[in-house]
Amino acid sequence: MSINADQPNGSMRDKLLPFLALNKDYLMTRAKLPIVVTWTSDVPIYAVQASLVGIQDVLNASHEKRDLILVGTNGVSAYEYPGADRIVKQAISRQREHPSGPYGDQLILDDLKLILHSQKWKALPHWDVMILNQDVTGRSDGKLINWAFGQTNYGHDNQWQIMSMQSLTRILRQNWDETTKASAIRLLLRHEVGHMFGLPAMHDVLSELPQRKDQLNESLGSHCTNLCSMRQCLTVKEMLDLAEELEESEAPDFCGECQSELDAANKYRKRLPNDVLSLYEDFKNDK
């Protein structure tokens, strides 16, 4: 089965008609779309497991019943998706700039995003999480920065999806044991998937919710200033310190303000009907 990202085939289009009639912002923010998780083959198993636990932490805190579809390193032939390794290679080969850092050549996240948005599986509305073991960078004010943990953003052009691309390289290269690295990785994914859900300024995603004004830091996006997974971490050491502080204090993953936002958002988001969810079976099984 071959799907065109702009024109779904007949059977899919019929089932998606109620959603095709909605604007993309509604689909991305109001429908409880499945979350598709992919990773490159050089991500260690323990790091994959820690990442998935971090994602599940957000699902548990949100109380949203979303399907989590683990594609992993595989391709999906029904959608002509070649797999995460080949996607990364394509992105690197198309880069006009070739930055490097202490951990080798860097992948420019904007180029990876463009490749991902061109995939035919975007015909099926979903959220994407891609986990990488490749040092990455991005742009700020049009200029490449030194490095980044990753990037989480909402949509592109007329595509129906929210995407998060996260690099574990700088955590994996630390001289820490696997348990310590896993703790930092779990927090990184929890933090970034929290952004996918709209934290910590949910009003920007769901206008019905009250606008949050306190305990916010607006540097490089909105972040929480409480003891919370949504606190900003600019270095690997800060990420580990926050992970350890949350664990040692036995604090919940999200502070009261962020948890209240998740609870309120759940009332406005709707699960997809079963006949639409059935469209994702090929996606899950055809690898």
Image (spheres, rainbow, N blue to C red):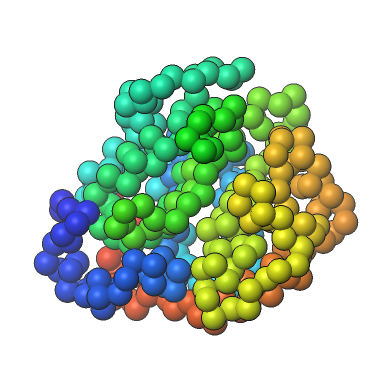
Please tell me which residue lies in front, 192 or 147.
147
Q: Is residue 3 left or right of residue 89?
A: left
Please say whether residue 215 is visible from this viewpoint.
Answer: yes
x, y percent for residue 189: 60, 49
What residue is drawn where x is 34% and y is 78%? 273
Compared with residue 154, is residue 97 higher up or lower down, i.e. above or below? Answer: above
Please tell me which residue lies in front, 94 or 96.
96
Q: Is residue 11 left or right of residue 230?
A: left
Residue found at the very far right of the displayed protein:
249
Q: Is residue 247 left or right of residue 265?
A: right
Residue found at the very far left of the displayed protein:
10
Compared with residue 169, is residue 69 higher up or lower down, i.e. above or below? Answer: below
Residue found at the very far front of the displayed protein:
141
Please say whether residue 136 is visible from this viewpoint.
Answer: no
Instruction: Place residue 204 in its image quadrant.
Output: bottom right
x, y percent for residue 230: 69, 56
x, y percent for residue 98: 43, 19
Task: Count up the numbered dots.
Answer: 0
What residue is drawn where x is 53% and y is 38%? 140
What residue is drawn where x is 36% and y is 52%? 156
Instruction: Place residue 15 in its image quadrant.
Output: bottom left
What residue is drawn where x is 39% and y is 67%? 25
x, y percent for residue 200: 64, 63
